Amino acid sequence: MTNIKESSPVYIPYIPDDVLLNCLARVSRLYYPTLSLVSKRFRSLVASLDLYDIRTFLGRTENCLYVCILFGSELIPRWFTLSRRPTRIRKLNSRWFGSCFRPYRVLTNPPTIMKEEKKSSDINLMVSIPPRSLAPPLELTRIAIGSNIYLGCIDNNGAFTSRFFFMDCRSHTLHEVPSTRVARKYIHMKVLDGKVYVVEGSKDPDYSNLIEFFDTKTLIWEHVPSPSVEIGYVSECLVFNRKLYLFGDKIMVYKPTENKWDDVGLEMPLHWVPSYLCCVVDNIIYSYGKNGVLCWYDSQGRSWKLLKGLEKLPKLPEDYTCVRLVEYGEKIAVLWEKKVCGLDNKKIWCAAIALEKGNGQTIYGKIEWCDVVLTVPKSSFIWEFTTVNV
């Protein structure tokens, strides 16, 4: 029997693109930025829409985290998406990443390591999306449906225009959709039954045009009848149990299946919090509490309760503007920022928390991972944190 030396080259026959695409479609998208490092061919395949068509056909789509950050005086914010950190790459050079992804580094010197960072598994990181016409000037409010993130835009005076766009998170390209029927001063956007609801949020609104929604299938904007009781302003909105709740000087609920409005009464006796501090998972509301803890709303007992089992989660900032919550595939994803002592930068942390119901009075959270995913200048600001399905 002939001995084969270990150093002998191994011949690998050429694999057709359709076979490679079928293989890549079965790999988590978290690894796509790293796979784009393999070769130019892999970079092209990872950026192909055919890959995502196959993922959909195979039922391999997954929830992916996106964060939008405004840097200093820049007018257009930058988008980042979660990725697995390459384990054997000495240096992340942007020219090696695929056309859909880029690494992002702020620090030129190694950062100061905080004690709490020892809790970070250092597995996940955020990679930036190339700024090739990803955002129209001064875009502000964003909401995700499927693989798209819908963007509302403002003019130079800070008022919303009637123009709307969406970013296709498969290719990270921007597309314009039909304009809204009414240009508004300020808006809240929510997703209900696959439709984008736009609610006027300024004081003394045009009551006859308080709400409209965009059907992503028909690409048509439709008017929503205003409540019979006039509302002076809407400070926050919430989609819960397939209903749209408006919180302001009055609390009203819209039921799309019946196309009617009702007073909330005792159904939702809440003084509502900013929408970026809460999310709904399996028809339960979760929120970041005033005491720097995560809690859930007991709709039967009409009270907030502590989400237990998170003793190992790093302490969240007391400043609630530094925290974001989103639903992450029947889990919770928490994003928060923390300043680094002695440096002009801050760390952005992210944690994925699985949920487990105990008895009717208890819900436990299990930390699946918790990492520092990005280092940014102190002057930066988190604008949006959302989940798409690709």
Image: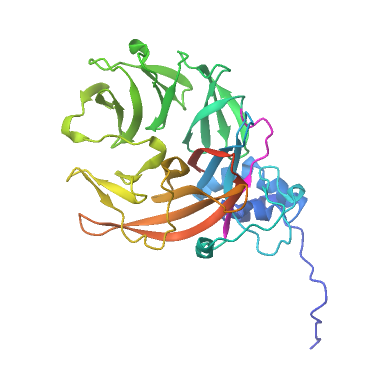
Kindly identify the residue that appears in the image at 68 percent across and 51 percent down: 107
Q: Is residue 39 above or below residue 157?
A: below
Image quadrant in which you'd find residue 68: top right
Image quadrant in which you'd find residue 27: bottom right
Q: How many numbered marks does the figure carry?
A: 0
Q: Visible in this render: residue 284? A: yes
Q: Which stretch is magenta?
A: 123-135
What secondary structure predominates along the stretch shown in magenta?
loop
Foreground residue, 148 or 364? 364
Relative image position of residue 349 (x, y in whole percent) = 51, 52
Residue that sits furthest to the front in the current view: 342
The magenta stretch spans residue 308: no
Q: Visible in this render: residue 390? A: no
Please indicate whether residue 193 sits to the left or right of residue 249 in the image.
Answer: right
Relative image position of residue 89 (x, y in whole percent) = 71, 61
Q: Is residue 310 above or below residue 18?
A: below
Kindly identify the residue that appears in the image at 52 percent across and 63 percent down: 115
Quadrant of the rendering where the N terminus is positioned: bottom right
Q: Is residue 175 above or below residue 161?
A: below
Residue that sits furthest to the bottom in the current view: 1
Kindly identify the residue that appears in the image at 41 percent across and 42 percent down: 320
Relative image position of residue 19 (x, y in whole percent) = 66, 54
Relative image position of residue 310 (x, y in whole percent) = 37, 60
